[in-house]
Image: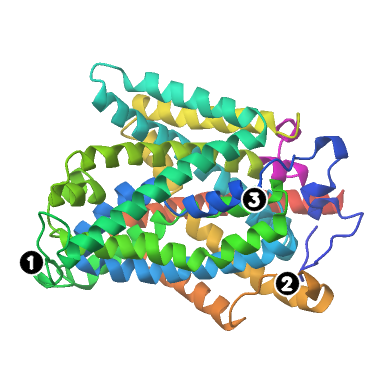
Amino acid sequence: MSRTTPSVEPSPADTSTRPESAAPAGDSLSHGLKQRHLSMIALGGVIGAGLFVGSGAGIAAAGPSIVIAYAVSGLLVMLVMRMLGEMSAAYPSSGSFSAHAERAIGPWAGFTAGWSFWVLLCTAVGLEGIGAAKIVSGWLPGTPEWVWVALFMVVFCGANLAAVRNFGEFEFWFAALKVGAITLFLVLGVLAILGVLPGTDAPGTSNLTGDGGFLPNGGEGLVIGLLASVFAYGGIETVTIAAAESEKPVEGVSKAVRTAMWRIALFYIGSMAVIVTLVPWDDKAVVEKGPYVATLDHLGIPGAGQLMNVIVLVALLSAMNANIYGSSRIAYSLVARGQGPKALGRVSSGVPRVAVLASCVFGFVCVVLSYWRPDDVFPWLLNMIGAVILVVWFFIAVSQLRMRRALEREAPEKLVVRMWAFPVLTWVALAGMAAIFVLMAREPGTRVQLYSTGGMTLFLAVVGYAWQRARAKG
């Protein structure tokens, strides 16, 4: 149904905007995630493979100024999470931003945001499986990578087909390992910077000001680093999806969002500062081995680099698990709101098992494409999802801008989490996203991604709007 103003509560007759919680009682999701699961998912959700591995390319481009890049993009992510937290605390939903976009903007927006994110997550499942398989194959030479990919897919597909608490337990322990590892890394790094770590000398500012200075590649290098840092933050939205299946959804979302600031500052910005202070930014090992492994090897800590490889593997497997979960719940929510094949909405024992299987199959197809068509189809798929996270953030900001007014007017008691300095910071966030889109259009390496994602988004928007009009006429 086409609307020009947001509606906080859909009317009983408005099935196109009815949240999935309105589905038949026997078809609803369980609430098997405990508060400890949600807390650790929130904590570990900001520590992904993009941080452990992908940040190397950003450092190589921006040099020491990568700290500024991560700080700027981190501020944007904090604003986005605050906005998402405000809406998710008011209306917990496994559809998260997709359900909020439908409620605030219209069904076509929920359709576009939801299905584009589903494609992103499913593709990421395949990419993470490939990355994890490469690590294990390196440890066990002669074993084919596809065997490990298949094994990982079976394990995590099975875990997600069972009760949701299985997903929660996997993520709890994965997150605990990641948090422990990066905390230890930061402690060792600070000790080395201070010169009190045995066998090391304080580097001072030599790596920050030498080899071209703080901005060795000028503004262009900083821009490339900024774009790399933006996409490293992708995935932290999972906690708002998981909150809908927790024991106390509102409390869980509120706590997770309120601690987002120090998590981002400590884990991302703090670790980038440690790395570029200890290791020359143009050290080839930063890209080849990954910045964390390169730093620990540089400090000469026996076996630490190999141990960090284990942590990277854990991060990849954690991301696989979380993305299978997230994609299945987004698909379930879309179908429950009448925006997808009904078969995907079937729930058994509180789990949308058909949606889980569909997400795993799509992920495995991506793996097959990486072997079968590595030069054309697979790169095209990667380009298509390249800027999806920015599209999602855009929908979050616009939804919050519209929904906040309606909440203040019709249900102020639901504003448990409030966006800072509304509406000023919401507009600042939107301006930041617009600036990133412009920067992507100017950089040859990201221009294709921007246009490909734009094409997919436009296609989904047209389909979603056509569906909306057809439902309105029916």
Residue type at numbered disc 2: Leu
Where 269 sits versus 42, above or below?
below
Secondary structure state at the residue bearing disc 2: loop
Quadrant in which the N terminus is drawn = bottom right
Classify residue 227 as left or right of residue 11. Answer: left
Q: Residue at x 52, y 59 (%)?
A: 391
Q: Are marks 2 and 1 in contact (CB under 8 Å)?
A: no
Q: CA distance from mark 3 to mark 1?
A: 48 Å
Q: Which mark is residue 415?
A: 2
Residue type at numbered disc 3: Gln
Classify residue 53 as left or right of residue 2. Answer: left
Q: Are marks 3 and 2 in contact (CB under 8 Å)?
A: no
Secondary structure state at the residue bearing disc 1: loop
Secondary structure state at the residue bearing disc 3: helix
Q: Which mark is residue 211?
A: 1
Q: Which residue is mark 3?
A: 35
Q: Which residues are magenta?
A: 331-347
Residue 382: x %, y % from top left? 40, 43
Residue 462: x %, y % from top left? 64, 52
Q: How many numbered markers are drawn?
A: 3
Residue type at numbered disc 1: Asp
